[in-house]
């Protein structure tokens, strides 16, 4: 319980839980990162702080907090962040994003093997470019999972952060067995002296924006549709490692990527944009699959950079998905595969040139 006679504020933002619907033309207004060139997008913001669990109220300046997994940092998340930024500006405070690392599902249901739109590195990358001041990547453990909603608010939010306001989504849950919801948080905010605002669901084309829905689109390789809900092209990051050099044998060298094992991946052949921080951005063709023509069994991620011949081993690349070309399939022989890849490259160039962003 708060001490020292703290009088909690009584004015709360009303709950308006009818869905917010966005037409296609409006989605870009919500997303700050909507370019097909994420690496070259430079946002002039101060360096974002990243905290784990060693912090106290004195580490924050009039914090406005928003809580969630933020997987994908999609359009719904960006509305939360935008509201937090508006509130922080009016209070001359800072925006604090509170998320758990690892994802709670990886602790509570490890056998489910939940794959993510944005593992931590990619999530932090997007949040920083959105101008967030501070991210708390709070350690999630079985001990954390046992905290009641009341204990979580008192021990973590009140004693360690002391926010002026907390902004959450309509389907927010927290505490042991998800025993608390947005209404619970509002009641506890009354006790512990912070305001609570609950945002309604955001809909695009009549569908509520959610990480789970976007993950389902990625698994179906519907990368263009997924981008509408994300607010930016779906992307992955990876380090270039040595492979079997099958692409070089065909005369079309590829960079083999080692990606985060938690990264969700669509399967197939795609038009992509490949960003290398040292040199810029290149068009490319990406294959995610098992290379059945060569009898492969394990999933691999390989990208051919068009009109590029430099050594990339050990370098980190960001791959933006533009359009699916086709499913991966087994060809009669390597020569037939070679001829198809040439067609894929030609098609990729046509797509990229039509976008006028390459």
Image (cartoon, rainbow, N blue to C red):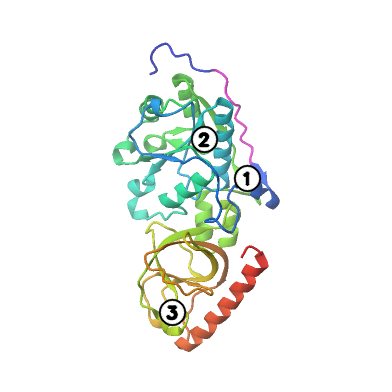
Is 17 covered by the magenta stretch? Answer: yes
Q: Which residue is mark 3?
A: 247
Answer few, some or many: residues within 10 Å of disc 1's Cα (few below 14, many 20 plus, some between 14 and 19).
some
Q: Which residues are magenta?
A: 10-19
Closer to the N terminus: mark 2 or mark 3?
2
* Residue ID at (53%, 54%): 214
Which residue carries the number 2 mark? Answer: 168
Q: CA distance from mark 2 to mark 3?
A: 48 Å
Residue 333, picture quadrant: bottom left
Kindly report which numbered mark, 2 or 1, lies closer to the viewer in this rendering: 1
Does residue 150 appear anywhere in the picture? no
Q: Which residue is mark 1?
A: 30
Q: Which mark is nearer the camera, 3 or 1?
A: 3
x%, y% of residue 241?
36, 68
Residue at image point 47% right, 24% down: 189
Within 10 Å of disc 2 (Cα), the crowding (few <14, some 14-19, many 20+) is many
Q: Where 346 sits versus 122, above or below?
A: below
Residue shown at 53% from the left, 70% from the top: 284
Q: How busy is the neighbourhood of tag 3: few (under 14 within 10 Å), some, or many (20 plus)?
A: some
* Callout 1 secondary element: helix
Question: Could you say which is closer to the camera, residue 10 or residue 240?
Answer: 240
Question: How far apart are labels 2 and 1 at the CA level?
Answer: 17 Å
């Amino acid at each position: 319980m708060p001490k020292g006679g703290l009088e909690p504020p009584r004015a709360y933002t009303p709950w308006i839980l009818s869905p917010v619907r966005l037409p296609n033309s409006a989605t870009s207004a919500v997303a700050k990162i909507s370019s097909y060139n994420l690496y070259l997008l430079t946002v002039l913001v101060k360096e974002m702080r990243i905290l784990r669990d060693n912090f106290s109220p004195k580490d924050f300046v009039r914090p406005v907090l928003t809580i969630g997994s933020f997987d994908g940092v999609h359009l719904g998340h960006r509305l939360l962040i935008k509201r937090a930024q508006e509130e922080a500006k009016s209070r001359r405070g800072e925006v604090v994003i509170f998320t758990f690392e690892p994802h709670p599902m990886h602790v509570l249901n490890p056998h489910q093997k939940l794959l993510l739109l944005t593992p931590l590195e990619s999530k932090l990358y997007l949040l920083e470019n959105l101008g967030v001041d501070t991210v708390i990547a709070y350690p999630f453990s079985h001990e954390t999972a046992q905290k009641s909603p009341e204990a979580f608010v008192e021990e973590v939010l009140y004693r360690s952060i002391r926010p002026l306001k907390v902004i959450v989504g309509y389907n927010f849950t927290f505490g042991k067995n998800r025993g608390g919801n947005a209404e619970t948080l509002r009641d506890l905010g009354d006790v512990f002296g912070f305001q609570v605002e609950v945002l309604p669901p955001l809909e695009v084309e009549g569908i509520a924006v959610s990480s789970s829905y976007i993950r389902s689109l990625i698994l179906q390789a519907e990368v263009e549709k997924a981008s509408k809900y994300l607010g930016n092209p779906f992307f992955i990051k990876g380090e270039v490692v040595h492979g079997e050099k099958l692409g070089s044998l065909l005369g079309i060298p590829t960079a083999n990527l080692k990606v985060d094992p938690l990264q969700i991946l669509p399967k197939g052949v795609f038009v992509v944009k490949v960003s290398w921080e040292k040199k810029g951005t290149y068009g490319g063709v990406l294959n995610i699959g098992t290379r059945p023509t060569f009898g492969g069994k394990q999933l691999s991620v390989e990208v051919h950079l068009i009109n590029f011949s430099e050594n990339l081993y050990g370098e980190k690349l960001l791959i933006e998905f533009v359009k699916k070309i086709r499913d991966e399939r087994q060809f009669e022989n390597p020569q037939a595969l070679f001829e198809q890849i040439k067609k894929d490259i030609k098609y990729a160039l046509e797509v990229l040139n039509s976008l006028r962003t390459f």
